[in-house]
Amino acid sequence: MESSAHRSPAEPPLRRRHRDRHGRGLRGPLAPPQVPISLTRSELFDDYVRESVERLERRWPQLAEVEFAVQEVPSPEDGEGDPESVPLGRLIPATQGGKSRIVVYRRPVEIRFKSRDDRAALVHEILIEQVADLLGLSPDAIDPRFDEE
């Protein structure tokens, strides 16, 4: 290798290639993509909603015509004028030629519970309440275990 003393001023200095320590190559991910540890919080939350919707659709097939969505936070209009109350979900009734839509707000739910099981249970409860409003039934009629959870 040439030293920089013998190089002309116009030539850039040689750069040594540095490999990672011990020359073993770059580290890979800690877990394969299909393992839950590699899912982001929003992906996990989407899974809670998806599992709950699938559970409800088995009992109520008409829910296949309803759109379910996740949003980060509610818009100011969703608070319904009460600045103290932050909604966890919302039912948007069908418009002419459109579908009804049920939205679950991820951040307010995550703030309330830290454990995965508690979040999943809260998501299911929110969806039961919104489906009950949509179908004009009580939450107990939508899921008989509603009061148990």
Image: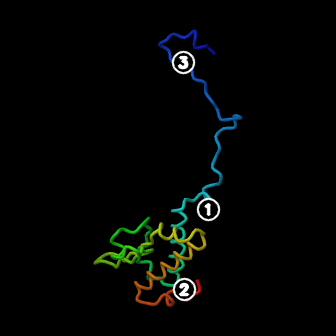
Residue, x 39% and y 75% (percent of image)? 101
Q: Mark 2 points at which residue?
A: 146
How far apart are the alpha carbons under marks 3 and 1?
47 Å
Are discs 3 and 1 less than 8 Å apart at CB? no
Point out the residue furthest to the left here: 96
Amino acid carrying label 3: it is Pro
x, y percentage for residue 46?
51, 67
Q: Which of 34 and 46 is in front in this view?
A: 46
Q: Nearer the viewer, residue 94 or 92?
A: 92
How far apart are the alpha carbons under marks 1 and 2?
27 Å
| SS assignment at label 2 | loop
Residue, x 59% and y 86% (percent of image)? 148
Quick check: 106 above or below 4?
below
Amino acid carrying label 2: it is Phe
Q: Name the residue under label 3.
A: 13
On screen, residue 110 versus residue 133, left or right, reads right
Q: Mark 1 points at which residue?
A: 36
Dot 3 or dot 1, earlier in sequence? 3
Mark 1 burial class by Cα count in 10 Å: few <14, some 14-19, many 20+: few
x, y percentage for residue 84?
40, 74
Dot 1 or dot 2, earlier in sequence? 1
Res 98 quadrant in image: bottom left
Tag nearer the camera, 3 or 1: 3
How far apart are the alpha carbons under marks 2 and 3?
71 Å
Tag nearer the camera, 1 or 2: 2
Amino acid carrying label 1: it is Pro
Dot 2 or dot 3, earlier in sequence? 3
